[in-house]
Image (spheres, rainbow, N blue to C red):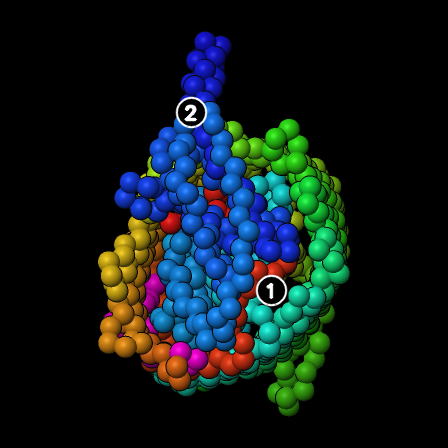
Amino acid sequence: MRILFGFFLIIISYSSQSQQISGIVKDVLDKPMANVTVSLYKVQDSSLVKINATNNLGKYEFIAVQNGNYYLHISHIGYVEQFSKPLEVIDDVNRNIDFVLEKNDANLSEVVVSSKKPMIEVLADKTVLNVEGSINAVGQDALDLLRKAPGVIVDKDDNLSLSGKNGVQVYIDGRPTPLSGQDLAAYLKTLQSSSIEAIEIITNPSAKYDAAGNAGIINIRLKKNKAFGTNGSVTAGYNIGVYPKYNGGISLNHRNKGINVFANYNYSNGRRENFLDITREQLDTLFLSHSNMNTDYEGHNFKTGMDYFISSKHTLGLLVNGNFSEGSNSNDTYTPIFYMPTGILNRTLEAHNSSIFKRKNSNINLNYRFADTSQHELNVDADYGKYLLRNDQWQPNDYFDKDGNFLLSRVYNFVAPTDINIYTLKADYEQKFLKGKLGFGGKTSFVNADNDFNRYDILNGGSRMYDSSRSNRFIYKENINAGYVNYNRQFKGFMVQFGVRMENTQLEGNSDGFTWNGQKYSLLNENFKRDYTDFFPSGAVTFNKNPMNQWGLRYSRRIDRPAYQDLNPFEFKLDEYSFQKGNINLRPQYTNSFALTHTYKFKLTTTLNYSHVKDVFTQLIDTTETSKSFMTKKNLATQDVVSLNVSYPFQYKSYSAFSNLSANYSHYKADFGTGRTIDLDAFAFNIFQQHSLKFAKDFTAELSGWYNSPSIWQGTFKMKSMWSVDAGIAKNIFKGKGNLKLGVSDIFNSLEFSGESNFAGQKINVSGGWESQQLKANFTYRFGSNQVKAARQRKTGLEEEGQRVGSGQGNTISQ
């Protein structure tokens, strides 16, 4: 009690020595002006202390201002800038200064606004990868970009992990995707960098957001034009590695005081090449497998919608977006099989797999926003999403003896349509309460998934015979109902935020088919249900008395539910010696995370995080039928992760640089019986650097690179290091309306993975890579109005979260 009382006295003492400067900015018609830039400077040396932007009510606020003499600078495009008189800040005296801006008579059409965000921004609650302005991001897809993101690891199966933890929840424009594993990876590969504005990595979301995602949230923000008037842009790109690839797009926008209508479309086409080598030892048999994989693809992405400003308080919005892709895969695998005691080749398996796929994803969102001058705000969203996945695969398996003579052939055909329907309704409300802001809301979502897996045996004459014993239909239904309450308040010198979210999960799965018990097939009619309720508290304290030296403490509890396909107990045949099956006993994994952050002079940012994960998911490769293997997911006992992230931006004249170091230590421990234990300690780190230089006239050069140290993938694979370096150059043309970019990815052709696993009497060595070294060219041309004005616009919840937590006030922008 004495310690707590002493800590309380310290907080009171600390908070009693800071003041604030606030006010309202209006136009000559006495209307509040939003998004006006307000800068605070020291009188002594005119050094910048902080930058603030007014909110929708025209209000700005600087909190935790130290004693001294300051002045304010007010600026907004199209208006005459203003400077305040010097003002003295003393103990416990708050200053309130209002401004009235007059329009500038200058012709705005002649004003060109030019700005470039850094490739990576590290804020208090998230890391932002600004894709839009990067030269080296040209011609890449979302999965390629995530490989470069600080702390993000993409493993050999394209699974995502963050700061040493799996269970990453991927959002698109603030909305979670239902896909996981290979389906999610395939979807991310269809999102071209030309359609992406930024990627946000949020490790500790507040109670306002879904609790799913043990490692946090990765939110991919697609581009949306913010300019007034009628305008647009066109883009075209070309990549060449082993095979050529093409991409292009068009964006149109019309905005005035009453309405905003927008639409964009992006197209991609090409061929991707991958290779994979696997060496597997099991009992007395050695398998040496080499695979070459090619994917021919064609993708279409679109986004269209409108915001209708009914009045100053009411906004109604409609958004429709989608992603359609189709193509074919070819996988040629050559597997010599040896008898290990003698080292003699026993037989060879050649598999020439081919498949045709189609993926269609469409979403519609209807939203409403109410906001008044008393800071009451209500947001309501209704969403419907539909995912259609179609796959038709042919798998011929040809066996040859040690002398190369043909032995036999087995040919299979797999047809697997999947339909996923998602219905979501949520509401969020905020208002002032006890000198802070109180928020509460609720969400209900329904997911219906239908996966129909059909296997056919191909007879000698080429006809198909349906194999009911190896076919399966899996129907999965999930309903999540959630409610939350969240409160934040700025005190003198520190800000507090705390909340709790409750989620009730009801799910049901039914798997129809047959199962093999080692001697015969028996009917599989597995039905399972789950009904559980969890509470997810979160909280944060930010000490911001001295803006140049801020500290923060954060805590959150999160969940990662099993993907529906990971629960399906049916055995799916991957090839003659490999299977994949789900686990109906797979439980959710839970994470408790604690973070300590420090920001020095708005540049050097350090975050120390500890997480304890219970019932960790891991994909295990186990044995069956002596020489065959199957992949399944199980819950490891525990995982403890300690991670450190340090970042620093540097600017000198026309040269800028950014460095980021992410390091983590993980301990995995589980015991599934004799010979089936896991006890691994892993230390891993990731380094990212980018250097930019402006030279001559309208030229910019960029060099970026990253390095991943040896690490652990999926709890069992010990992987070696990976690294890559990209370079590019850009030039503005056509009086700044056009931009030409030329770049080379993976200059040294070093981007390959390799590692090993030893579990359940099975030793595996794996290595592989893809067409990572490419020459890329891109051209963008902008047309129409380029006036950027303040407008009433509806922010996504993730944007609001970043503003509130990152600064502890309004819309502060730290520099």
Residue at image position (62%, 48%) is 57
> Residues in magenta?
736-753
Disc on res. 730: none
Question: What amino acid type is highlighted by mark number 2?
Answer: Asp
Q: Position of residue 813 (x, y in %)?
A: 45, 49
Q: Position of residue 478 (x, y in %)?
A: 73, 52
Q: Is 693 placed above or below 348 here?
A: above
219 to the left or right of 660: right
Residue underneath mark 2: 91
Residue underneath mark 1: 572
Which sits in the foreground, 105 or 414?
Answer: 105
Q: Secondary structure at mark 2?
A: loop
**First in residue order: circle 2 vs circle 1:** 2
Res 221 seen here:
no
Which sits in the foreground, 531 or 490?
Answer: 490
Q: How far, Cα to Cα, is label 2 from label 1?
A: 71 Å
Which sits in the foreground, 161 or 657?
Answer: 657
Q: Are marks 2 and 1 in contact (CB under 8 Å)?
A: no
Residue at image position (58%, 35%) is 488
Q: Is 101 placed above or below 576 here?
A: above
Residue at image position (43%, 59%) is 129
- Mark 2 crowdedness (10 Å alpha carbons): few <14, some 14-19, many ≥20: few
450 to the left or right of 776: right
